[in-house]
């Protein structure tokens, strides 16, 4: 199944954060956002997970140059606050055009991430060679 969908499977060791840095970084980001929501009542932090994830997934990411939601679904999310604006500005786009646009944005995200990963690796390796 992983080969069919071109997924590179990586088995990681439990309780070893170094083997899964992206997940640990995301958890750190999520934790910081939840802290901002739960300043007054820390016992209800679990009520804020869904809205926090929605905010994270629908916001523009500097390294991706798009929102994760857009890269996954090919469109920005429909939020309740956008209902009146979107109703006035609905435009039909051909399936092929949308498909090409999403493909281009995903390729741009891959290239941008690869560039940033190379920079991060060089910075990390430079610190380790001393």
Image (spheres, rainbow, N blue to C red):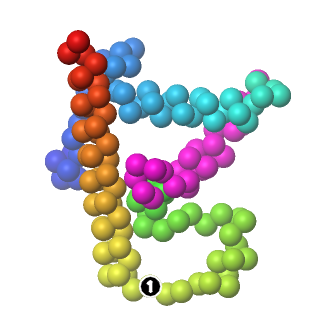
Residue 117 appears at what percent x and percent y?
29, 39
Q: Is residue 49 magenta?
A: yes
Q: Counting other residues with Cα less than 10 Å from the Cα at mark 1, is it few (<14), some (14-19), or many (20 or more)?
A: few
Please give the range of residues in magenta. 43-66
Q: Give above or below for 27 relative to 103.
A: above
Relative height, residue 70 to residue 90 (above, below): above
Question: Which residue carries the number 1 mark?
Answer: 93
In what element is the residue under mark 1? loop
Name the side, left or right, on which 130 lies relative to 26.
Answer: left
Q: Quadrant of residue 16?
A: top left
Helix, strand or loop: magenta stretch: helix
Is 95 or 122 nearer to us in this picture?
A: 122
**What residue appears at the point 23 percent right and 12 percent down from the top-left corner?**
130
Horizontal and vertical percent position of residue 41: 81, 27
Is 100 left, or right, of 37 in this rendering?
left
Q: Which is more toward the observer, 111 or 47?
A: 111
The residue shown at (26%, 31%) is: 121
């Amino acid at each position: 199944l992983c080969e069919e969908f071109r997924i590179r499977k990586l088995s990681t060791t439990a309780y070893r954060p170094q083997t899964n840095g992206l997940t640990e970084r995301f958890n750190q980001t999520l934790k910081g956002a939840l802290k901002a929501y739960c300043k007054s009542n820390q016992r209800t932090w679990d009520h804020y997970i869904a809205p926090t994830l929605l905010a994270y997934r629908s916001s523009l990411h500097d390294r991706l140059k798009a929102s994760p939601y857009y890269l996954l679904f090919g469109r920005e999310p429909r939020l309740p606050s956008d209902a009146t604006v979107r109703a006035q500005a609905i435009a039909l786009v051909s399936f092929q055009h949308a498909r090409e646009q999403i493909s281009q944005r995903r390729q741009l995200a891959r290239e941008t991430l690869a560039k940033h990963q190379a920079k991060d690796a060089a910075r990390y390796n430079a610190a380790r060679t001393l």
